[in-house]
Each structure stands twice: as C-alpha cells, then as structure tokens.
Amino acid sequence: MLHTALLRRVSALAVMIAMPGLALAQAPQKAPAPMTTPAANTPAGPDSVVASVNGKPITQGDLAIAADDPALSLPGVDEAQKKNLLVDYMVDLRVGAQAAETAKIGDTPEFKRKLAYFRDKLLLDDYLEQEAKRAVTPEAEHAIYDQTVKLMKPEEEVHARHILVDNEAEAKAIAARIKGGEDFAKVAAETSKDPGSKAEGGDLGWFTKERMVPDFANAAFAMKPGQVSDPVKTQFGWHVIKVEEKRTKPQPTFDELKDQIDQHLVRKAQQDLILKLRADAKIVRTDAPEGAAQPAPETKKP
C-alpha cells in the first residue's frame, strides 16, 4: 500500500540521517517542497503553511498530527531534520491522496466503510483521552496512594550474601573459612558459582521471603544479622549464607507509585465511561453470537 511505502521511506531516511557513516549525497535527491519561512522569533502557529501540493496547503498543524503518529517515530533525528522528513512525507501523502481522489477511490463503498470506521475510532480515542485527563488529578492520585499504602501489610526484609557451590563438602569448607575469620565477600568472589552475585561479593540486596526458594528463604529469615549459616541445599546447589541486616520493608513513596496510579485512574475512568455509554444506549444485536444465551420463547396466554 502507498501509506506503508511512505512510512518505510520516512523510516529509511531517518536511519540514514541518524547514522553518520552513510552518505546521503549518494541517495537520489528530490526537489525540496516549497515552504514559507515564518518571521524571525515568531513561533509558527497551526495554520502556518509549510508547503503546498497543487495549490492545497500543508500546515504546521498537519505536521503536528503526523508527528504524533507512532509509525512516524524518528528517534535520534534532530528537530530540523525531522521537520523536513515530515514535510516530504506529507507532500507524498497529499500527492497520492489527490491521485486517489481523481481515480474516484473515495466513492467506493469499501472506502466509505473504512472512512466511517476510522472516524469513529478517532472520535472515541480523543473522547477517551479527554476523560483520562479529567481523571488524573492530584487529589485522585493521592487518594489512591493513601488507600494503597493503608492496605499494605508490613513485610520483613533481609539483606544477605551467599556463596553457591556444587557439593556439601565444598560448602562446609567455605563455611569453616568464613567462620574462622575470612572476609565473606572475598571468599564469595573467589569461589561462588552464582554469576549474578559473585562479582558483588555474593550480595543479594534486600529481599522478602517469597522472592527466594523456600529452603533458602527459611534459612535466611531464621538467622540473625552477622550470622553465617551451615550449608543449605536447594535445587541450585549448596549455599553458605550471611545475613547482613533485617528490617521491615519500607512503604513505597508516592513518586515510586505515581505512574502505576495514573495508569489505574486512566483505565478505570475509560472503562467506567464505556460501561455507562453501553448502559445508556439502545443496543440491538441481530446476529446470534456462538454460546450466547437465547431468550426463552414467549408462550400465549389463554
């Protein structure tokens, strides 16, 4: 399709611009589209004309809409280059659209159905976006945050290190070395088979009980800070564990939860809106969805 081809062209140009090793001079050159230059230090408004195709203008507002299209995302491209790419894209889009109009593509029943579908979709998308903006307020955010942290039960956390080896005899020898006074982190860096923590001296950071396999967690949470365990067997091998600290897990801050809260508010507001619209509408289905319950047949009264 023409639209897909244009998107590919914009993406290819963006990649070429973003990679300095590619020579743009070797690419086929296209005559630049005529553009109007706004007055110095005057921000271009949405009605500012940047180009025209057969006398029909392309405005700054048209470029803004194109820039919001996820398919036209241009990471690594500066604003001036991005604008030129979008102008070229809009020129090609208008050229193709005008040719399609001449060919009476817009008069076909199939096109009219597509146009009606995408009009409805755009209307709904914008309507839901407005509802989302109304739903996400500081008052609503803090209300959800307060309710969330109030429901959070206190959890114990442990900060521990471990050394993982293949057999019990090796684990016993390592435990004896550490209990004899050797530095746990140094021994872990030398002997541990765990690639994720070996370089950090066996440090596992803070964790709650359910994050670890049961045998490991039961041993770690039964220990006191500073204590080194006897060998502990799990499905991964044999562990020597040292508990550094224990604490009650701190509650997350508002900033840590803000993104999740906003997503919740948006989803709930949009879902509630759709459910209300459905409830208020007169909806008649003339098909018979598979598995749907059918109304019981009416019986005549005597």
Image (tube, rainbow, N blue to C red):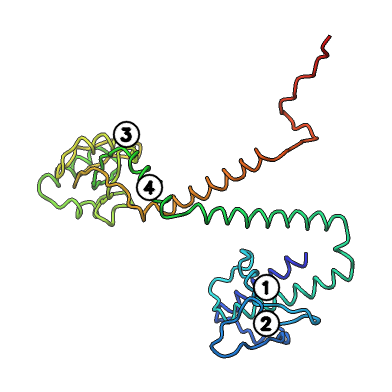
The amino acid pointed to by label 3 is: Pro
Q: Which residue is mark 2?
A: 50
Q: Which residue is mark 4?
A: 145
The amino acid pointed to by label 4 is: Tyr
Dots 1, 2 in contact, CB < 8 A? yes
Of labels 1 and 4, earlier in sequence is 1
Q: Secondary structure at mark 1?
A: helix
Q: Residues within 10 Å of mark 1 (few under 14, many from 20)?
A: some
The amino acid pointed to by label 1 is: Asp
Dots 1, 4 in contact, CB < 8 A? no
In front of the other: label 3 or label 2?
Answer: 2
Of labels 1 and 2, earlier in sequence is 2
Of labels 4 and 2, earlier in sequence is 2
Q: Give the numbered dot on residue 214.
A: 3
Q: CA distance from mark 1 to mark 2?
A: 9 Å
Q: Secondary structure at mark 3?
A: helix
Instruction: Quadrant for residue 85, please give it.
Output: bottom right
Q: CA distance from mark 3 to mark 2?
A: 65 Å
Q: Which residue is mark 1?
A: 62
Q: Is residue 174 above or below residue 234?
A: below
Q: Secondary structure at mark 2?
A: strand
Q: Residue furthest bottom?
A: 40
